[in-house]
Amino acid sequence: MQVKKIAVIGAGVSGLGAIKSCLEEGLEPVCFEKSNDIGGLWRYEKTPESGKPGIYKSLTCNTSKEMTAFSDYPFPDHYPNYLHNSKMMEYLRMYTRHFGLMKHIQFLSKVCHVRKHPDFSSSGQWNVVVETDGKQKTYVFDGIMICTGHYTEKYLPLKDFPGIKKFRGLYLHSWAYKHPDNFVGKRVVVVGIGNSGADVAGEISRVAEQVFLSTRRGAWIWNRVWDNGNPLDTTLFTRYNRILEKIFPTFMINRWVENKLNARFNHANYGLWPQHRFLSHQATMSDDLPNHIISGRILVKPNVKEFTKTSAIFEDGTEENIDAVIFATGYTFSFPFLEDNSEILDSQHSMFKFMFPPQLEKPTLAFIGILQPVGATIPTSELQSRWAVQVFKGLKKLPSASDMIADINRRRKKMEKEFVKSSRDTHRVRYIDYMDEIASELGAKPNVFSLFLWDTKLAREVFYGPCTPYQYRLQGPGKWTGAQKAILTQRDRILKPLRTRMVKHTGPSSFSLFGVKVTCAIFCLFVFMLVIMQVIGH
Ligand SMILES: Cc1cc2nc3c(=O)[nH]c(=O)nc-3n(C[C@H](O)[C@H](O)[C@H](O)COP(=O)(O)OP(=O)(O)OC[C@H]3O[C@@H](n4cnc5c(N)ncnc54)[C@H](O)[C@@H]3O)c2cc1C
Ligand SMILES: *[C@@H]1O[C@H](CO)[C@@H](O)[C@H](O)[C@H]1NC(C)=O
């Protein structure tokens, strides 16, 4: 049989994982990347071209390295837990080199059109039109992996901000913000309190005369440095916690987290208390924001009602003279190269598991990384790629179109119930649930129960420890012999970069929270609740 040729569009983290997944399964990937380098969003550029993701110089990951790694390629143990973007690029270059991905990437090659091959209904093939050096060339492929990212087009709703055109100062989208130098001694409004808004406001506030952080909705603020100084995600994203989340009613989980966040600083006193509950919208990751607020460098404000030539008028009627506005209003995305495929574009927000358009006669096109995990992107899109490749090879089958559409509708209903309405939240998934869902399709979901029988130590780490990507390499297609060791040494890799000055005292056991004591306490509480409910019921 002829080796299937797969077009991978984009060489960001999702594209790199896609190329690797093709190679792993003996397919022949050709990756088209319109820029001249790998890395996508993570490659910092002073003056990015429009249509390219853009980040600021100081951007540091909000997911920790053990949770962010490719599943068979842990970060070096001395790397910090939260990586600066330049370190992330180093890792991506190492990964690319290690697995020999570079020779499969064609740079400065922009995919302009993806169209069905005339005999698509039997062959499942695609014609791909690629522009290189101003010349267009058409290739035929057996499968398509779309890895073009979803932080590419700035969302800048200027019509929602009357007067902005009259404003004489500088205004820009956070996409174009690179470093604080232009804002020394200025009075600046930052609009939006997502991750970028909080970061940018904080950074500028160190040099500006005054920063105003304007938010319509407010936000729950959580922080990278969690209990005992461990990374937030390695502490919270465990299988054990996920089970607790399922046992306890949502309002109790919300109350527990919100109490914890308010114990750090009272969100009401700081003007940030949102109308939504913690679990129903994306929380903002910021370790610094409360420090800037309590030091007066940042003043929290409601939505801007109107701009004048020199000032901003907020919805509470207050007016502030300002020199600059930064809109941290987020991003949208689109797939211009798919414009001839109405049945794909129409279903853009309703893909089967965010990957497969349900109406295609042949499942030979997959979207990779077009979703919003509450957790890291690399492992999610990598797992998607591993499954897509199995589908392309015909080793895994998709359900019928009607079953897929039913599944999509079920998911949509559930999301409408769980999350507040916002464009981002339509692509939001709970990390462990989604990973397990895709892994089940692929046959790589770790069987924790049988693990307990043959390797208790490993099973305990898989269950109580951080749900790291290596868990999805313990069994099934793509099984990696190093997975077990990677899991058992993950805590060493978390601690190594912190322990740069040896002290005699070992301190309290840093992961005691996962211990048996807590399990017992929660179990007793649960039984107690059941008893109470019985009593009330009678
Ligand atoms: C400010 C910010 C911080 C973030 N922090 C984190 C974090 O800490 N942890 C985390 O897990 N995630 C984070 N994310 C999410 C982030 O989107 C992912 O980590 C990841 O970078 C997405 O990679 P990607 O490969 O899917 O897309 P991208 O990185 O956007 O790459 C897409 C690539 O496709 C190319 N391309 C696009 N169109 C074409 C075309 N027509 N032809 C050829 N090539 C094309 C582009 O040039 C680009 O190289 C963050 C996002 C933002 C905006
Ligand atoms: C990290 O930041 C990105 C970009 O703002 C966001 O989409 C993602 O949800 C954040 N992740 C976490 C765990 O906060």
Image: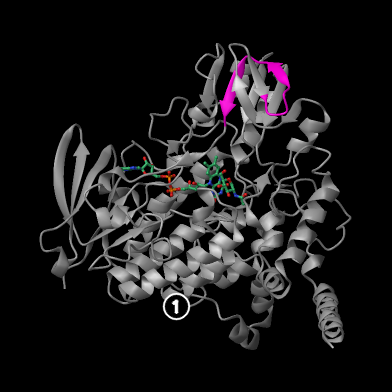
Q: Is residue 321 magenta?
A: yes
Q: Residue at x 57, y 33 (%)?
A: 328
Using the image, determine if residue 163 lies above or below residue 64. above
Q: Residue at x 42, y 29 (%)?
A: 48
Q: Is residue 386 magenta?
A: no
Which residue carries the number 1 mark? 443
User: Can residue 379 be seen in this snapshot?
Assistant: yes
Location of the C terminus (image quadrant): bottom right
User: Can residue 469 be seen in this snapshot?
Assistant: no
Using the image, determine if residue 316 lies above or below residue 242. above
Number of on-image labels: 1
In percent of width and height, residue 215 lies at 66, 35
Using the image, determine if residue 199 lies above or below residue 420. above
Residue 527 picture quarter = bottom right
Using the image, determine if residue 481 lies above or below residue 39. below
In this rendering, position of residue 493 left or right of residue 335: right
State the colouring used for the structure image: one colour
Q: Residues within 10 Å of mark 1 (few under 14, many from 20)?
A: some
In percent of width and height, residue 442 lies at 42, 74
Residue 221 picture quarter = top right
Q: Residue at x 79, y 43 (%)?
A: 267
Magenta stretch, residue numbers: 314-327
Location of the N terminus (image quadrant): bottom left
In percent of width and height, residue 23 lies at 32, 62
In percent of width and height, residue 61 lies at 60, 45
> For numbered disc 1, what is the local secondary structure?
loop
| Name of the residue lying farthest toward the left | 118
In this rendering, position of residue 69 left or right of residue 290: left
In this rendering, position of residue 57 left or right of residue 248: left
Looking at the rendered structure, the kind of residue marked 1 is Gly
Q: Is mark 1 within 8 Å of ligand 1?
A: no
Residue 287 picture quarter = top right
